Amino acid sequence: MDRAHLAERARDRAAALAAQGVHAVALTWVDNAGITRVKSVPTGRLPDAAAWGVGMSPVFDVFCLDDSVTTSRHIGGPTGDLRLHPDLDRLTVLAAQPGWAWAPVERWTQEGEPHAACQRRFARTMMERAAAAGLTLRMAFEVEWFLGQETEDAEDPRPAGTGPAYGMNRLVALSGYSDDLLATLAAQGVVVEQYHPEYSPGQLELSVAATDPVAAADANVLVRQTIRAVAARHGLRVSFAPVVTAGQVGNGGHLHFSVRDADGALFAGGAGPYALTARGESVLAGVLARLPALCAIGAPGVASYLRLVPQRWAGPYQCWGRENREAGLRFVTGVAGHGDQAANAELKCVDGAANPYLVAGAVCALVLDSVDAGLRLPAEIAVDPASLPDGDQPPRLPVSLPEAIGRLEADDGLRAAMGEALFDAFLAVRRAEVDLFADAGPAHVAAATRWRY
Ligand code: GLU
Ligand code: MG
């Protein structure tokens, strides 16, 4: 780390920020509970933060969704310190929070070594490994959220903007909010591709353009905090939780991804099913085979399994299908003739409790493991799996967090990719959250999760 160079770059950026009326910079990272944590510095301190980092305890690696603290083999307890180093390339003026800018951080030790359990570093390392193998991954996280009225009673979430699912009525009711949101994201350089009212009461969805995996995870953090900040300006509140009300359609955080090598797109222009190349088919087969383990990362909460059930378009089956919204792996070819640019795979099981850096890093790891393994996809499921006779249905993805944890524990490839410290701390948090809700029914789980994300 070239501290002098970092300080110099940050001095220029801080001067420009100050000239725009920015007084402070929020420095965020996402913990193993999927919660975005923050420290902030006055703008004038940015050069110091860039060069030397900002202190933060490593114990946040074992924080749970309710702020209770567990422990793990390598990380836990009140001692130690880490340094948060902002990524100056991502510094963004927050248009809905006057006076504020934002940057994501990577966490380093006081000795100037990368922190072994840094989630963003994991994503970046995996992306760099893919690049070294000649692979370019593009990713985008969709965001679904519940927009609610501020009520006295947090137990009683009241949707903002009533009206039919996907209904224009709802958009009319939320015109001002929606305009403010889209303008704010545009001012922050976020490329929005679509925005619409979703199925559940008060539910909305926004999708953004694909970028590299780390940028996609950063964008996910920025977009979610922007959605929240704009809602606050309108006296509204937001939940990205996997379910807001038990028994209703939940909030997905689907990950779209595609891969290219030196010859072009792996998911188009080939001789396999839907023009998949042999390497592309092997990637999808590899990801599909390990989807149950990935669920512990992409659907990491107890509440995630209230969402991941059939016939809610959450993709709860371990199968694939073209444009099949009940398949854990939905293959998107794009419009005929546009496959080279548009073809991608969608991981439906990912939800709003997932840490996007861990999801991005894990998917890169699965791609690397499978691209040259010569794997073939099983038969496509082209119908609603629930409509098939019992014996013909594809396997369900894990139906509970303990089941998903078991599958991840058994995945040596993901263990090796994440490294012991991160893998162990992540699993410790998952297990602690299982314990937290050991005696809780669905309504309690939903209520305890609702306003944490
Ligand atoms: N809300 C659904 C979910 O839980 C997804 C709906 C859609 O396909 O966009 O994942
Ligand atoms: Mg949706």
Image: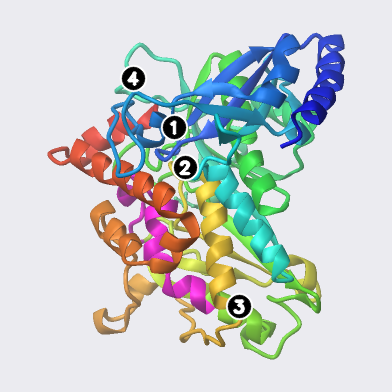
Residue at position x 69%, y 68% in the image: 259
Viewer-side label of 3, 1? 3
Q: Position of residue 139 (x, y in %)?
A: 66, 56
Viewer-side label of 2, 4? 2
Asked if ligand 1 lies within 8 A of label 3, the reply is no
Viewer-side label of 1, 4? 1
Q: Is the magenta stretch mostly helix, strand or loop?
A: helix
Q: Give the range drawn in magenta.
A: 285-310
The residue under label 2 is 352
Instruction: Give the total number of marks visible in the rendering.
Output: 4
Kind of element beneath mark 4: loop
Asked if ligand 1 lies within 8 A of label 2, the reply is no
Visible in this render: residue 100?
A: no
Q: Earlier in the sequence, mark 3 or mark 4?
A: 4
Kind of element beneath mark 1: loop
Q: Nearer the viewer, residue 405 or 258?
A: 405
Question: In the image, is 42 to the left or to the right of 119?
Answer: right
The span from disc 1 to disc 4 (Cα, nearest Å) is 14 Å
Q: Is residue 11 above or below residue 246?
A: above
Name which residue type carries label 4: Ala
2 and 1 marks in contact (CB < 8 Å):
yes
Q: Position of residue 27 (x, y in %)?
A: 61, 24
Q: Which of 307 and 48 is in front in this view?
A: 48
The residue under label 3 is 371
